[in-house]
Amino acid sequence: MLEIEHENQYQYNEDVLNWLKNNNSPFFDWIIIIAFYTSLHKIDQCLHKRGFNDFQIGSHIKRNNLVINNLPTTICTEYIKLYSKSRVVRYKQDTLYDIKSEDLQDYLDIWFKTIKPFN
C-alpha cells in the first residue's frame, strides 16, 4: 500500500473516532479498536518512508518488531500499549464493560498526542 493510501485510511479512521467521541458513543471497545487501526496506518506510512515494503510490514508480528527496532521508544511503547489493549477488547469479551472513560481517553491520547504528530 502506498504512503498516501495509509494516510487516507488513518484520516478516515480519525473522522470515525471524532464522530464517536462527539456523539458520546458507549462502545468504548470499538473506539479503542479504531484508535489502534488509525495508529497502525500511520505507523505503516512511517515505516514505508523508512524504506520498508508491504511484505516486510505484512503482519502484526512483523510490524511490531519493526516498530520496536526502528522507531523511537515513546512511539514503540505507546503503539504496543494500544495494540495490546485492542487485542484484549477484541478477544477477551468479559472485560468490555470495564473500560472507564478516563482510561479511554488515555488510549485516544496515544493516537492524538503521540502517534498522529510523529513523522
Image (cartoon, grey):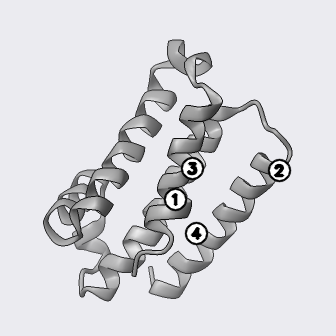
* Residue plotted at (63% across, 39% down): 30
Mark before the other along the chain sequence, 4 or 2 = 4
Looking at the picture, does residue 98 appear above or below residue 66? above
Q: Quadrant of residue 23?
A: top right
Classify 10 Å Cα crowding around label 3: few (below 14), some (14-19), many (20 and above). Answer: many
Mark before the other along the chain sequence, 3 or 4 = 4
Q: Judge depth for marks 3 and 4 and give the one in front.
A: 3
Mark before the other along the chain sequence, 1 or 2 = 2
Q: Judge depth for marks 4 and 2 and give the one in front.
A: 2
CA gap between label 4 and label 1 equals: 10 Å
Q: Judge depth for marks 4 and 1 and give the one in front.
A: 1
Name the residue beneath numbered marker 1.
111
Name the residue beneath numbered marker 3.
108
Q: Residue furthest left?
A: 69
Classify 10 Å Cα crowding around label 2: few (below 14), some (14-19), many (20 and above). Answer: few
**Which residue type carries mark 4?**
Tyr
Name the residue beneath numbered marker 2.
22
**Which residue type carries mark 1?**
Trp
Classify 10 Å Cα crowding around label 4: few (below 14), some (14-19), many (20 and above). Answer: many
* Residue plotted at (56% across, 17% down): 98
**Which residue type carries mark 2?**
Asn
CA gap between label 3 and label 1 equals: 5 Å
